[in-house]
Amino acid sequence: MAGGTALKKKPVTGMRDILPGEMELRQYVLEEIRRTYRSFGYTEIETPVVEHLENLLSKQGGDNEKLIFKILKRGEKLEAAYGAGDKEGLADAGLRYDLTVPLARFYAENQAALPNPFKALQIGPVFRADRPQKGRFREFFQCDIDVFGDASPLVEIELILAISTVLNRIGFGRLHPFRIVLNDREILRGMQRAAGFPEEDFEKVCISLDKLDKIGKEGVKEELLSAGYSEDMIEKYLELAGNPGTEPGDVLDLGKKLEGCIEESVCPNLAFIMSSVRSAEDVPVRVEFDPTLVRGMGYYTGPIFEIRTEGFSGSVGGGGRYDKMVGRFLGKDTPAAGFSIGFERIITIMMEDGTGEKLSAKKTAFLLDKKLDRERTAGALREAMRRRNEGETILLTHMNKNRKFQKESLSKEGYSEFVEFFV
């Protein structure tokens, strides 16, 4: 900048610019997500990216509540807070860290105008002051489907089928076989009760169990021992949470071991969800039971699920039932469950393996000689519009002197056919 300090070209840490090639893939995937979810009866809504700070800090978002981008109060309110030395009172709003908390507020506010049950589709950016790394950013998109007002297992079955259908339609499942693992928060509670852990320590023990894939069984044991729990309790807990099997029948067997520590309906309900999904032959998807699955959000109350794929250490989506969240707004609990696809992680994987290039629609470039007369130019325009109206992507541009280099450049942008119009 002449006469001053040059402005910064790079985006803010954790944010990023998106180039045309990736943007095309993102739009393609978003279109398929919307089309698929609508075919399952979900209707799209939108909530603000800014949410009340007390809603975001309601002890339901797990560690994400530590990653909130807070927004300072405005005008006289900010001056008053500064003047009083009230550091805690400087902010009254924040950027949403997920779509679920704002959606529960949306439902509580608008339920009188919504059908019952209400099947919601919501897509939009969320923000977390996290440490950026591969496939993880401070601003990222989430694509959620949720159902309010239905406590039946049909909700979870449809959520899993919808997510599986999307992953197969966009071609992700073909190159990256995935599976959906299930558990139930009540099974986690039952295992802790059976082992003798105090009820009030449920979340604390879950945090340790959630590290099983990172620090191993011995690491979890050491962490729980250092927290003051007895070795007998820990051994019994890890034995129950070990590897009892992944089939619906294995869920029922674990239910028998937890008799008296869990409601009788919990394990049959989860087994029914698994067997029902497997019976839907037109959607090839592996569903497995994993009693060590925790999911970090504190708002889950029942079945929980997570998408795992080969070659990627983290999950690429997850969700579960959260029947008590709406009650925090209304004073009356409302059945609710949802599933969120890991949009950014899936896009990252597809960009790296070239899946996106194979999915792009056919793109044709019309190259017009710069000296082309009006009549032939009009003919080219008519032909381009005819083909565009039939769904094709047509680029209309002037022909360069070095046509070979021009075609090579356009090929990198995905153009596979070239129609030349000479004088």
Image (cartoon, helix red, strand yellow):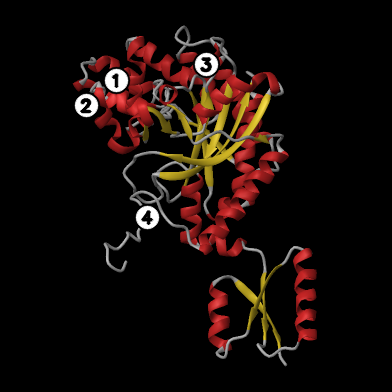
Residue lying at 60% horizontally and 23% vertically, measured from the top left? 107
Badge 3 density bin: few <14, some 14–19, many ≥20, Cα 10 Å = some
* Horizontal side of residue 226 vs 306, given as left or right: left
Residue 42 at x, y = what percent? 68, 34
What residue sits right under mark 3 in the picture? 329
Badge 1 density bin: few <14, some 14–19, many ≥20, Cα 10 Å = some
Q: The disc labelled 3 sits on which kind of residue?
A: Phe
- The numbered mark, 3 or 2, whose residue comes first in the sequence reads 2
> Label 1, label 3: how many angstroms apart (C-alpha)?
40 Å
Residue lying at 56% horizontally and 83% vertically, measured from the top left? 406
> Label 4, label 2: how many angstroms apart (C-alpha)?
42 Å
Q: The disc labelled 1 sits on which kind of residue?
A: Glu
The quarter of the picture where the C terminus appears is bottom right
What residue sits right under mark 4 in the picture? 11
Q: Nearer the viewer, residue 183 or 45?
A: 45
- The numbered mark, 4 or 1, whose residue comes first in the sequence reads 4
Residue lying at 32% horizontally and 60% vertically, measured from the top left? 7
Q: Judging from the image, what secondary structure is the residue with disc 2 in?
A: helix
> Label 3, label 4: how many angstroms apart (C-alpha)?
37 Å
Q: Nearer the viewer, residue 242 or 161?
A: 161
Q: The disc labelled 2 sits on which kind of residue?
A: Glu
Comparing labels 3 and 2, the label whose residue is closer to the camera: 3
Q: Judging from the image, what secondary structure is the residue with disc 1 in?
A: helix
Q: The disc labelled 4 sits on which kind of residue?
A: Pro
- The numbered mark, 1 or 3, whose residue comes first in the sequence reads 1
